[in-house]
């Protein structure tokens, strides 16, 4: 119980830190944008932007959809579906090669494996750092990617942390019941945090590129890499890993739904035979 309490407490502190840093970055960006009278669409406050993200994330139709997905995950978790898939994968698919792609048991922190992209201590600062580029040059492609990803973390992390504990589920091997949901907040592994964190950066790229099928679908596949790594490493049951990815998708979708309402700058990744990059365009 002490461990769970500490996890929740530090999670709240991380959220406050993220919000504080992001407010500072956005304030700098807004101050620069004010100098240009034509950039009216960039003058909305961070409170209005994040408030719009939360309204989109907690909209009635989205909550109904989330309830249906969690209901399906609950069926898998509280029957033999989760355990059957887990056992089949561990017995027939997992190997030293898949381990080398997923995460190195010897030195995870120095290896660019699928699990790395789910490390919040790296990916959240990277997104914030990318967002800070807009404080130097407004409306840059990299900066907008960082801002969108940061906003997705801000809107999605509280819900992800809450559901992690509310489901009361444990990791594989922790108890005989397997993946079944237990007493709320008796355990904190009902949703994979790594899968959530690892999905957001790539889903952001996919949403920024609705018309380029190559980049969009490549990004969608990449967004599931960390999700797969949690199943491969036997760190989460399939339903827990998939819920993490799903919550990342809902968070990113909420941010871009809010962007559509704001109709500001549009950013799109580009790929060709001679290279790749990001294109930014805006309308005023």
Image: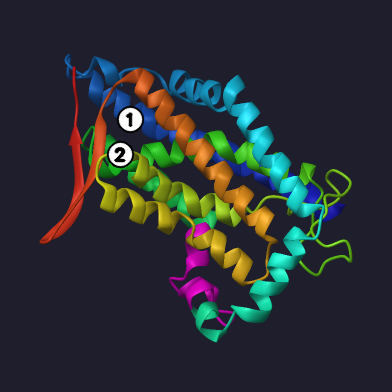
Q: Position of residue 277 (x, y in %)?
A: 19, 51
Task: Answer whether residue 21 is visible to the viewer in this image.
Answer: no
Q: Is residue 18 visible?
A: yes
Vertical side of 123 occupied by 128: above or below: above
- Residue beneath disc 2: 210
The residue at 39%/43% (across/down) is: 204
Please state if 234 lies on the left or on the right of 254 as rendered: right
Q: Nearer the viewer, residue 177 or 153?
A: 177
Ranked by sequence position, the earlier of labels 2 and 1 is: 1
Residue drawn at (31%, 24%) of the image: 30
Furthest residue in direction bottom, as rendered: 96
Q: Is residue 60 above or below residue 87?
A: above
Q: Tell me if residue 258 comes above or below residue 273 in the rendering.
A: above
- Picture coordinates of residue 44, whole percent (x, y): 36, 17
Nearest the viewer among 10 and 94 is 94
Horizontally, residue 140 falls left or right of residue 230, namely left
Quadrant hosting residue 136: top left
The foreground one among 38 and 213 is: 213
- Label 2 to label 1: alpha-carbon separation: 29 Å
Q: Which residue corresponds to the image point at 68% horizontal and 47% vertical from the top-left?
A: 10
The residue pinned by badge 1 equals: 28
- Label 2: how many residues lie within 10 Å, few (<14), some (14-19) or many (20+)? few
**Which residues are drawn in magenta?**
101-118
């Amino acid at each position: 119980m002490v461990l769970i309490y500490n996890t929740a407490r530090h999670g709240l502190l991380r959220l406050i830190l993220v919000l504080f840093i992001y407010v500072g970055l956005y304030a700098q960006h807004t101050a620069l944008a004010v100098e240009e009278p034509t950039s009216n669409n960039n003058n909305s406050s961070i409170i209005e932007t994040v408030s719009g993200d939360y309204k989109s994330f907690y909209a009635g139709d989205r909550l109904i959809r989330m309830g249906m997905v969690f209901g399906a995950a609950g069926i898998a978790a509280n029957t033999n579906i989760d355990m059957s898939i887990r056992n089949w994968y561990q017995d027939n698919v997992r190997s030293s090669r898949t381990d080398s792609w997923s995460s190195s048991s010897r030195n995870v922190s120095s290896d660019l494996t699928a699990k790395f992209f789910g490390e919040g201590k790296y990916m959240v600062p990277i997104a914030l750092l990318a967002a800070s580029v807009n404080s130097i040059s407004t409306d840059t492609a990299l900066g907008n990617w960082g801002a969108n990803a940061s906003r997705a973390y801000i809107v999605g992390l509280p819900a992800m942390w809450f559901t992690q504990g509310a489901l009361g589920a444990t990791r594989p091997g922790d108890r005989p019941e397997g993946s079944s949901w237990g007493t709320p907040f008796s355990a904190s592994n009902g949703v994979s945090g790594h899968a959530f964190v690892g999905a957001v950066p790539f889903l952001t790229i996919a949403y920024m590129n609705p018309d380029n099928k190559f980049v969009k679908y490549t990004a969608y596949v990449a967004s599931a890499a960390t999700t797969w790594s949690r199943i491969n490493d036997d760190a989460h049951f399939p339903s827990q890993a998939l819920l993490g990815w799903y919550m990342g998708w809902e968070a990113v979708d909420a941010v871009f739904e809010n962007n559509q309402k704001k109709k500001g700058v549009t950013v799109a990744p580009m790929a060709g035979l001679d290279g790749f990059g990001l294109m930014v365009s805006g309308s005023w």
